Amino acid sequence: MKSNLKSFCIILSLALCSFTSPKPDLSFQAQKYVSQTLTFEGKTFIVRAYENIIYVENPVDTLYQKMNIYIPEEYFTGKKVNAYTAATAPIFFPNKVGGYMPAQPATLKETPMGMGGNRPPMNGMPPMGDRRPEGMPAMPQAKPSTVVAALAKGYVVASAGARGRTLKGSNGEYTGKAPAGIVDLKAAVRYLKFNDKLMPGDANKIISNGTSAGGAMSTLIGATGNNPDYEPYLKALGAANATDDIFAVSAYCPITNLDHADMAYEWQFNGINTYKKGWPAPAKSSDAPSVLNDEQIKASAQLKTLFPAYVNSLNLKDTKGKTLTLDAEGNGSFKDLVINYVIASAQKVLNEGKDMSGYSFLKITDNKVTALDFGAYLNYLERMKTPPAFDALDLSTGENMLFGSATIDKQHFTEFAQKNSSIEASSVDELLVKMMNPMYYLGQKNTTNAKHWRIRHGSKDKDTSLAISVILTTALQNNSIDANLEFPWDKPHSGDYDLNELFAWIDGLCK
Ligand code: DHB
């Protein structure tokens, strides 16, 4: 009798449970939309807005593991936009990840990424929306978003939220530490590919886009397609049964290759012993800089010496097949390549008619930028972070938090910081460091890398070393992947500032 009652109760609670929280249906519900009328650059158009779609069967956090999908109305009536049809329109996949924090999906209302996002401080860094070049006025709220601009181009836009480093579950355990954010975005890609037949847009033409930590995520989605390392995590989440490789990557100042970012930062900034954190107010040139202490100066020198061995170990080749190297001092053909990217950036704006006479670190003859005084350029760039810039000896950075665990908030992720830690601290599992670094996934077996990459890092961006994007681009090119890098002139840490060029690149690939 007793056991009958018990069975009855179990069955009842299971029934109630499945009634109150049914598994999200991962098939796209074409009828569940709200029509929105949008205006962009004088053009008015209608889109179907599918918002807050939970993209996994077993979500851990439904505030973030959800996606917004926007589709031009024309694709439901057999019409074309910008020469695309429902079958051929690319799917633009922007994320709003900043500072490795939890991120909501993009909506129709947001300001462009990098100019109004609600970014958290990272190692003394102000939220992204505050990080304007000196003198630049605040962006008005409610500026047309990247999403609206992309829809006007005829792209289907799908933006997924993702868990991040500060998130906690109801039991008090952390739920957004590495690799949660990238796993979420890959699960959202699987949703789109799983639903390719039910949804306008070509899921073989997914183009990810992101800035900073979001740029890093964008590179990771592109690098790690279908790699088995992520499989257990995707399985646990109940990701849709589909592949997760994508077509192309757009990344602005990706804060990536975190396990080598400290040495790259000191290779670049060693000898510059003043810094401006730029927080709480945006740094002004009139602000008095802070000065590195003796320990930081020592750490800088040690980290700098580690970088040549790393670069040399990669066996990177230039376009002529010559190996790119650095000597013990950090000089050599790899450094020349970094300098050449800065020169190319200056040349581009010079060709457009910009007065470059104020940049005394450039040598210009007959309208040609012929040389760059790298040291003087770095004085203009200015150091922003203290060594080690990412794996802080006192665990004070956002990246230390990214590499926490379910029960530990902050950990080290490099040998250098673990050895020299100023406090009692543990280190994250090596596999997780690997899973957050696209470099380890290029040209690997069981992995499908995106075929096309567009990487931008402003020439005035000091959130990470210029070397990081040069290494990534060169490694991509060496794997016969179409990768293009520019350092847009004078641009600080920001993204989506050249949407016309970005969309022209996408059209060039997809039309
Ligand atoms: C971001 C900026 C940083 O300097 C960093 O270390 C990590 C992330 C960001 O803006 O997302």
Image: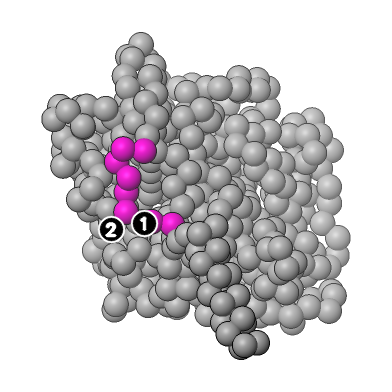
Considering only vertical position in the picture, is 41 above or below 374? above
**What are the residue bounds of the magenta stretch?**
24-32
In the rendered structure, the answer to whether residue 317 lies left or right of residue 201 reads right
Looking at the image, which is closer to me, 449 or 316? 449
Considering only vertical position in the picture, is 384 above or below 496? below
Closer to us: mark 2 or mark 1?
Answer: 1
Main secondary structure found in the magenta portion = loop
Q: Is residue 251 visible?
A: yes
Residue under the image location 60 percent in, 22 percent down: 141
Looking at the image, which is closer to me, 330 or 90? 90
Q: Is residue 324 visible?
A: no
The residue identified by callout 2 is: 194
The residue identified by callout 1 is: 26
Q: Could you classify mark 1 by the number of other residues whose Cα lies within 10 Å: few (under 14), some (14-19), or many (20 or more)? A: many
Question: Which amino acid, by three-letter code, is at mark 1?
Answer: Leu
Question: Which amino acid, by three-letter code, is at mark 2?
Answer: Phe
